[in-house]
Each structure stands twice: as structure tokens, then as C-alpha cells.
Image: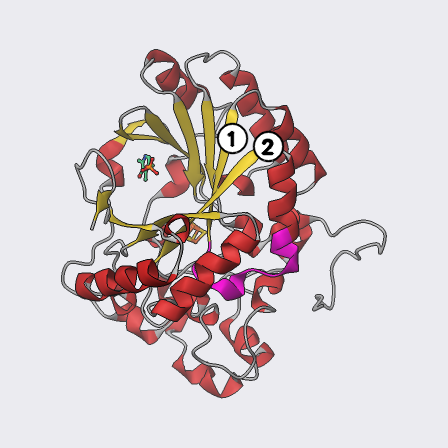
Amino acid sequence: MITASSGARITPTASPDWRQLWRDSITDGRELLDLLQLGHLADRLPAADAGFALRVPRGFASRMRPGDAGDPLLLQVLPQLAELVQAAGFVTDAVGDLAAREAQGVLHKYHGRALLIASGSCAINCRYCFRRHFPYGEEMAAAGQWQQALKHVSDDKSINELILSGGDPLALATSKLEELSRGLAELPHVTRLRIHTRLPVVLPERIDAALLEWLHALPLQKVLVLHANHANEFDGSVDAACASLRHAGVTLLNQAVLLRGVNDDAQALTALSERMFAAGVLPYYLHQLDRVQGAAHFEVTDDQALALMEAMRSRLPGYLVPKLVREIQGDPSKRPL
Ligand SMILES: *Cc1c(COP(=O)(O)O)cnc(C)c1O
Ligand code: SF4
């Protein structure tokens, strides 16, 4: 295991504290390339990370293959010169989030479900993410004690599912999540809590005893939608995090983004479904990329995407085939392709 040369020592008996591991993430492109024996590629890094900082936890980086410049995990986090290309149709608010905002940190686009932008932070910065442009500073539902967001949900009795998204909601301290449960107790029409998070995959140490206790005690149905795009993102530490979440009564699903160079072949997508199911996770959505400025080089055409779905259907049981969707501004749901 890689440790920082300075910083807090981890005692051998305790499991590492996730906040410490987060602070110890790699944020320097050269360091990441050196670690992977790819230092000769450092001159291809864009200046100032092309405006979106590199950030990757060391545990996730350790799942990358040394010496492979096309590693599917590396490509998700390494700043590229291609991000500087201004491609037609790729914009800063690709999914209309600013228009759908209804209260501080609340996006209410679909019937029955309100999405709370719980946190502006993530443990990893994914190059294809809309988050590179969204003005999260003012948009966090967890600000104060979730009051504005919960007021909105309390006033709309049609909402039966609350979705914590972000950013990454599990980037919040567990004490902040506990504040939310106190508010939820006053919203009897909300019966499900869903959490959209990449943390169990990129920093599985986040699934610690306190978080599991919080989840276990929540008197709601709990769904956790992970985000993994490639089978190599899973290892024993992710399996263990998933197993403990399931023991806490959480249903586990995964959403992936179809990304050129990362998972745009039938073998990679099939292996992803098989691997996630081995960890107790069912595939949910396979997203066509949001057309976010700086991410055009990741785009896969709809024709290719449909051919990949066909190939997956011919190789996998139906329950391991995700739904291919795209988000269209103004639609009443994600749009199936
Ligand atoms: C994607 C999304 C949801 C969840 O949609 P599901 O199809 O239920 O997964 C809810 N609210 C918003 C604003 C979304 O973008
Ligand atoms: S919101 Fe999800 S996709 Fe975007 S940077 Fe955070 S973890 Fe990555």
C-alpha cells in the first residue's frame, strides 16, 4: 500500500480513517503518471488540469495497470489536452440542472422523486462529469440543517422517494446524514431513500461502522446506486463494502456511463455486469454521456451504443443488462434509447 511520506500514522489495529485517505488522494498528474511508470507522458498533461482538478484516491489508483496509458480507470481521471477542444453542442449545463432547481439544492424533475444535491464534493474527479461546470457552491441541500430542502419535500406530498446526489452525498460527515434522518422522521409520505454515490467504489473505507449503523437504523427502504464503469474498479475492498451495505438492508444498483476508450466494447460491458453481480450489485442504467464541454472525446454514437446493447443481450441474462438511457431536458424521465 502507498502512504504519504508525511501525515497521520494509521495504527495497525484500526481500519484507516476515510477522511485521512481522502486528504491523501493524488492530485498531481505527474505523480499519478510516475506511479504508473508512465512519467514520459507528463508533457501531454494540459495546463492547470484543463480547469478541473485531478483527484483520485490512492486505493483506486492502485487498481490501474502500470505501464498502460489506455488503462480504463486512468482514462476516467487523467486530464487530457482533448478537454480543451470546444466541440459543437457540448455545453456547461448539459442537463438543465439550473432550470430544474426548486429550492436550495433540490432538483425536482420527475414524478414522485426529489433529488437533493447533498454535497458539492467528490472523492474522485471524473473527467466526463457535468460537475466540472455546475456552480455547486450555493447549491448544497445539506447547508444549514437541510431545512430548505426538507421544507420543499414536506410541502409536496407526491414525493415518496428522496434521492441524495451531488457531488457525492457520502462525502458528507455521517453526523450530517444523521441530521437528515431527524428531518425525514417528519415526512411520512417519503418511504424510500436513495443514495447516488461513487464512494463505495473509489474509497470503500467510507463504508465504516458509523455509516452502516445510520443506514441500518433508518426506518425507510434504502437504495444505493453505485457508479462504476469498468470491472477493474472492483476489488476485494469494494466487495467488502458492498457486502456490509447489503447486510445493513440496502439494495445495491449501479449506473455506468458509456465512455469511448473506457468501456465501449461488448466484452468490457459484459465483464462489468458479471463483476458487479459478483459483488451483489445489479446493473441499473447505462448512460449516454451528458454533452458537457470538455468531454466530447468520450462520446460514443447512438448506433454504436445500440449495437453494444444488442451484444450484451446476446451474452447476459436479462437481469444483468442495464437500460441504455439519455437525459433530455424537459422529459418526464430518463429517455430509453
Ligand atoms: C436521474 C434523476 C432522477 C432519478 O431518475 P430515475 O429514473 O428514478 O433513476 C431523479 N431526479 C433527477 C433530477 C434526476 O436527474
Ligand atoms: S459526481 Fe460522480 S461522476 Fe461526477 S465527479 Fe463526482 S463521482 Fe465522478
**Which residue is drawn at the image coordinates 39% and 54% (left, top)?**
256
- Would you name the residue on which mark 1 appears? 222
x, y percentage for residue 307?
23, 65
x, y percentage for residue 258?
32, 60
x, y percentage for residue 118?
45, 35
| Rendered image quadrant of residue 314 | bottom left
Q: Look at the picture and state if 161 lies above or below 291.
A: above
x, y percentage for residue 219?
57, 20
Element assignment for label 1: strand
| Rendered image quadrant of residue 53 | bottom left
Q: Look at the picture and state if 73 lies above or below 201.
A: below
Q: Is residue 244 left or right of residue 251?
A: right
Q: Quadrant of the N terminus?
A: bottom right
**Which residue is drawn at the image coordinates 44% and 43% (left, top)?**
120
Magenta residue check for 235: yes
Q: Amino acid at mark 1?
A: Lys
| Magenta stretch, residue numbers | 228-239
Residue 28: mark in rendering: none
**Which residue is drawn at the image coordinates 46% and 47% (left, top)?**
282
Q: Is residue 298 left or right of residue 284?
A: left
| Rendered image quadrant of residue 89 | bottom left
Q: Nearer the viewer, residue 330 or 235?
A: 235
Magenta residue check for 231: yes
Residue 249: mark in rendering: 2
Residue contact at pointers 2 and 1, CB within 8 angstroms: yes
Query: Across the whole image, how many numbered discs are drawn on residues?
Result: 2
Q: Amino acid at mark 2?
A: Gly
Locate ligand 1 by image quadrant. Answer: top left
**Which residue is drawn at the image coordinates 58% and 23% (left, top)?**
218
> What is the crowding at mark 2: few (fewer than 14 residues within 10 Å), some, or many (at least 20)?
some
